[in-house]
Amino acid sequence: MSKLFSTILFIPALMISTAAANDRDQIESSPFVIETLAAGLAFPWSLAFLPDGSMLVTEREGRIRIIKDGALQPEPVRGTPEAYVKSQGGYFDIVLHPDYSQNKIVYLSYAHGKSNANATRVVRAIFDGEALENLEVLYEVRPTKDTPAHYGGRMAFLPDGTLLLTTGDGFEYREKAQLLNSALGKIIRINEDGSIPDNNPFTNKKGALPEIWTYGHRNPQGLIFDSQTGTTYMHEHGPKGGDEINIVEPGSNYGWPIATYGIDYSGAQISPFTEYEGTVQPIKYWVPSIAPSGFAIYRGEMFSEWDGDLLVGALAGRALHRVDMENGTVVGEEILLKDLGERIRDVRIGPDGAIYVTTDSENGRVLRLTSQK
């Protein structure tokens, strides 16, 4: 059983100008108090806060773990579905039903299938405190693919009770992101029971999948709804450069692979266009890539000066990025946790106003960040 312990670290921060992605000026240190809530996790992907103060944590290896009373419980949650665990495949996001306090329903996204036919799947179940019961399959991306990469897998509920799910392009199937007869490279919108809302933007379009909400995505692993402004934000991985933050509007085309600020890993040009008519420009992009995963908007008293700012985990960048927002516009950026040297997979704001992150490794951790003030 892993006991809670605290370590005070002084983390240097870097401020980045939004005018030029590579223009970096060092500013004074911005310290956190860092507590390790759990260690020894196998690539922890996502976490969710339960009303009793405990947390659920997904491990990409295909387990859900519980942190309770300041300790990682030794036994994983029982009754969980089998995942396709390979490369980027495994368990992804876990979110609570908006009425979880009454119905105890949780939603899980994960890779399902076999090497020659796998896809992102969403299930829901009742969590009794130790096990999942009454597991239901709600949605599975179609068509299946034969690659163990680019699943997307982030989820977020909207105020109307519908659920958004991000899906990746499967890495080898980038052209599918532009096709409305494929769920690859999309944001999907379904009802809480898996049925498809009749007011989705392509419901009545011939040949289009009715579950599609937006399209033209590469591998989106960040998705949040800001209840104060009514804005939905998402971020996605670019190839070599071209990671993006976007504002989500139903029916919109976000450009991949027609328009991108990145190039292929080989150095080859993917598209001559960074902008293209009919596609949406990001509000922020990174060159070189930071590999964003995990996303939160800060609302709380602990870091009140950050109210409304976006927090982005960086896998390749091995840091936590604070994107300074003013009236819906990006005005600056700060790099945090760089001295940890760890890949940041998930970012959440806890009920206590603290920032929680998971580190992406075979000996991953859940960290709680509080203010020195």
Image (spheres, grey):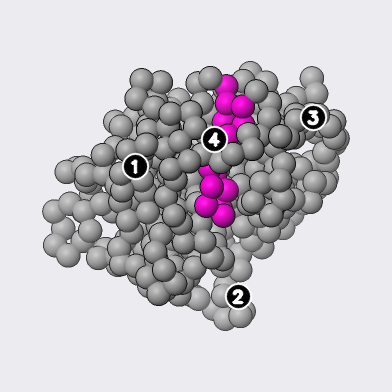
* Within-10-Å neighbours for mark 1: few <14, some 14–19, many 20+: some
Q: Nearer the viewer's eye, disc 2 or disc 1?
A: 1
Q: How far apart are marks 4 and 3 (CA)?
A: 19 Å
* Amino acid at circle 3: Phe
Q: Which of 351 and 243 is in front in this view?
A: 351
User: Is label 2 in a helix, a strand or a loop?
Assistant: loop
Q: Which residue type carries mark 2?
A: Tyr
Earlier along the polypeptide chain: callout 2 or callout 1?
A: 1
What residue does disc 2 label? 265
Tag shown at residue 5: 3
Q: Name the residue under label 1.
A: 135
Mark 4 or mark 3, which has the lower sequence index?
3
Between tags 4 and 1, which lies in front? 1
Task: Mark yes or no: residue 351 visible.
Answer: yes
Which residue position is annotated with label 4?
56
Mark 3 or 2 closer to N-term? Answer: 3
Residue stretch rendered in magenta on the structure = 53-68
Placement of 279 over or under 194, stated as above or below: below
Residue at image location 22% in from the left, 44% down from the top: 195
